[in-house]
Image (cartoon, rainbow, N blue to C red):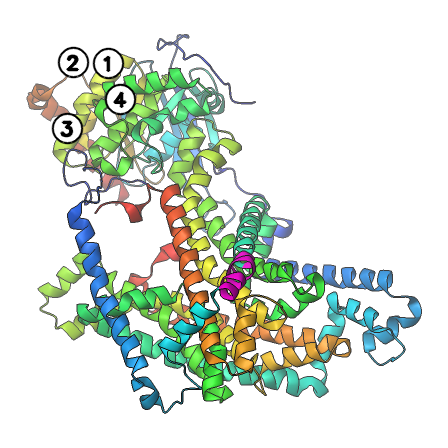
Amino acid sequence: MAAASTPRPRALGLAALPDALVVLLVALALVALWQLAAWLYLTATVPPEFREGVITGADTRVPAELRVEQMKLPLPSMILAALANPDNADQLWLAGLTTLRSAVLGFAVGATVGFLLALAMAQATVLERGLLPYVIASQMIPVIALGPIVYSIFKDEELSRVLIAAYVTFFPVTVNTLKGLRSVDPNSLALMDSYAASRWQVYRKLRIPAALPYVFQALKIAATASVIGAIVVELMGAQHGIGVTILRTQYYGPANAYKLWGAIVVASLLGLLFFQLVAVVERLVLAWQPEFRRGRHR
Amino acid sequence: MTATTRTELPATAQAQSGAAISLQGVSMVFGAPDQPGGGVRALQQVSLEVQPREFVSLIGPSGCGKSTLLRLIGDLLSPTEGTILVNGKSPRQARLSREYGIVFQQPVLYDWRTVIQNVQLPLEVMKVPRAEREERARQLLRLVGLAEFAQRYPWELSGGMQQRVSIARALSFRPLLLLMDEPFGALDEMTRERLNRELLDIWAETGTTVVFVTHSIAEAVFLSDRVVVMSPRPGRIETVIPVDLPRPRGPETRELPRFFALIAEIRHNLREVEHHEG
Amino acid sequence: MSSARPAAAAQPSAAPRPRAGGAALRARLQGWGLPSAIFVALLALWESSAIHGALGLKEYQLPYPSQIAQAIIDRREVLLQDAIPYTGLEALVGLILGGLLGFACSVLFANVPFLRRGALPIAASLNSIPIIAIAPIAVLWLGFGQPSKIAVVTLMTFAPMVVNAFKGLYSIDPQPLELMESIAANPWQVFVKLRLPHSLPYVFQALKVGTTLAMIGALVAEFFNAEHGLGVTLSNNIQVAKMPMAWAAIVVAAVLGLLFFAVVSLLERAAIPWHVSYRKR
């Protein structure tokens, strides 16, 4: 705890590596462990003559139970192979893109509506008092359960995905924008008053910039939720999208084990990438406004 | 060396003769010297002796290292060079023997504890039995005039009151030494003067040695036996000014000509210090 | 941490203890007035086919509130049977397990610098991954019943807890820590007397977020493979176009979610009465 004041020796070993590299190392180590565990599992549960067949899925003599076992702990190397295989591109990458597109669109719509609604609510207390409890309550309700319902009503998978993504984005964005608009400290407001700034000017120069960190907090949550929402819609009989791929490969059984896992990886990447995208945008946008940066929530 | 756990509290009198605090050629450098620009040299060759029961203030412009010096005495930092002795021991041993209490500029009270629980914190850590530590805490709250607020939470108290709780906590285990880092800096002038007076009363009653860091010349003069004027970059002791005002001191002390003369002298010294900065 | 709060302590003497008097209660009720009115108005509109007309929907696509209510009353045993021992239990157990695991990991990561730098970001990134996608695999490992759903929920609630617990336990201002050091507290004492109480607000924040995630996790995991639960009821009834019952399942899920959240909030109130959010301003 007490900082040593003696000059630090030239840092050796792990401490010297940049953070990003350490994360990469840990990730690689995890994958390596997985590969090892999967391989051990394979050799332990599957007799040698079936091993090749179990992995490639080509050998029909391999008993089904063995294949199912294999699905539990597959070799990461084979998952990567499945991901790279151009035959799978449609079901994996194209499907992923389909899902992502809808999620992003819905996200954009929901965020815009939420932001504008929050602006409106900040103006009209009536609006706020009437609607805020619902907006807050909806955060506690598994809104996603509405996904299948929406799909069954509109029967249009694209529209349903977008609607649900918009819906799950709208709520946190509204709540957080409102919180952010209100978070301005009274002294800054007094300063604006002393400049005889108009209401809109106060918003543009003070409240909205102050709200941005909160808004981005919500956007990051919403990014993941939008992807989940889009996937959930697909579980109810859609034709395209990564959720559909997961359902189908699961249904068609062990021969598709690696495609299933590949689809899971793709789905995970969707969420991760969208989240990181929002995070990057956040850093860019907020970097321009250091005086409003809330260092606390980093 | 493990921390000593005492089930009984030590007497206030110093057991050993000699200086309570002895600093010899203490230097403090933050950061690695092999970086471009070198490390930050917070303190350079500081030597000072503080006698038992003495009240010494450290004053100086920002960056002169007074807070660093305080933390070095308290073993919250280790010096790059030089030796420090606290009651004849290394700072680390003194800390492990719980020989000093510290008061920061912020009260640093734990929100989840009531006032009396906050005061008992050091005694809990020292594993003093419950009945004894509660009694001790009550005594101290009486000493700082907050006995009725024992069951309140810190946020129910004003800043000045919170700081008094912080002082009570620091004294709860009867340390031989009290380290105070601008404890009244966040308070208004009136409260500050009142607390200065109360601090002197507490000091007189407990007989602890006090090292007091402050920005306020008047405060330093009012409280101390000696005022140590420091200068920055690198931090060092510029001069030490004895305060020969009579004790006990009170509001009337603040109106003595000698009081103003001392303030002027110290102010003059500080201006010289700034001059050296160029 | 408690620093001198000049604004809150304008009175030199201590502020009075918060007490819910008649005035406060009245204000609370007034607060409920408008939203309740809106709720009733919305239901009325719905029942009167105004929404159907606006969106061009038929009865089989969007059931009326009265039909939904009827379905709930008629099949209440089934719905309760779904909600409590299945969906509710899966969500609850998963939340507890995920919370415990997350907390334990945050302590582990904090004490092993390599893991803190390398593994913590990975655990945090679990927040952004649709864990739902793991549901089929969970079923492979743990079967059709509750354990597989609990596993999914655990994974989902693990991430927010790791991040929050870590922040609460280890992002503490230097001075409270220096204080502990000055009285030579050992690491265990620092943990119990400082880190743990300090982390409680953060832990509860993660738990509250977790209740929503847990409900979602349990429901959606049931979509994949399950025999019982609100998610099963929902998807089954959609597939046979029995919409009132599907909506009934959603309503029950919503109520369950709200109850869950309310319980956690009450627990929070009991556990950290000292927190800023409860103080009378």
Residue type, label 4: Leu
Q: Which residue is mark 1?
A: B204
Label 2 environment density (alpha carbons within 10 Å; few <14, some 14–19, many ≥20): few
**Observer-nearest residue: C273 or B241?**
C273
**Observer-nearest residue: B43 or B132?**
B132
Magenta span of residues: C77-90
In-image side of A24 versus C190 (left or right): right
Residue type, label 1: Ala
Q: Quadrant of residue C125?
A: bottom right
- Name the quarter where the C terminus of chain B is drawn: top left
Q: Which residue is mark 2?
A: B248
Q: Which residue is mark 3?
A: B193
Residue C239 placed where, x, y %? 56, 81
Q: Which numbered disc flags the more N-terminal residue, 3 or 1? A: 3
Asked if the residue at tag 2 contacts the one at tag 1, i.e. Cβ–Cβ closer than 8 Å, the answer is yes
In front of the other: label 3 or label 4? 4
Q: Quadrant of residue C240?
A: bottom right
Residue A192 placed where, x, y %? 14, 65
Q: Which residue is mark 4?
A: B141
Q: CA distance from mark 3 to mark 1?
A: 17 Å
Residue A248 placed where, x, y %? 66, 81
Tag on residue B127?
none
Asked if the residue at tag 1 contacts the one at tag 3, i.e. Cβ–Cβ closer than 8 Å, the answer is no
Q: CA distance from mark 4 to mark 1?
A: 16 Å
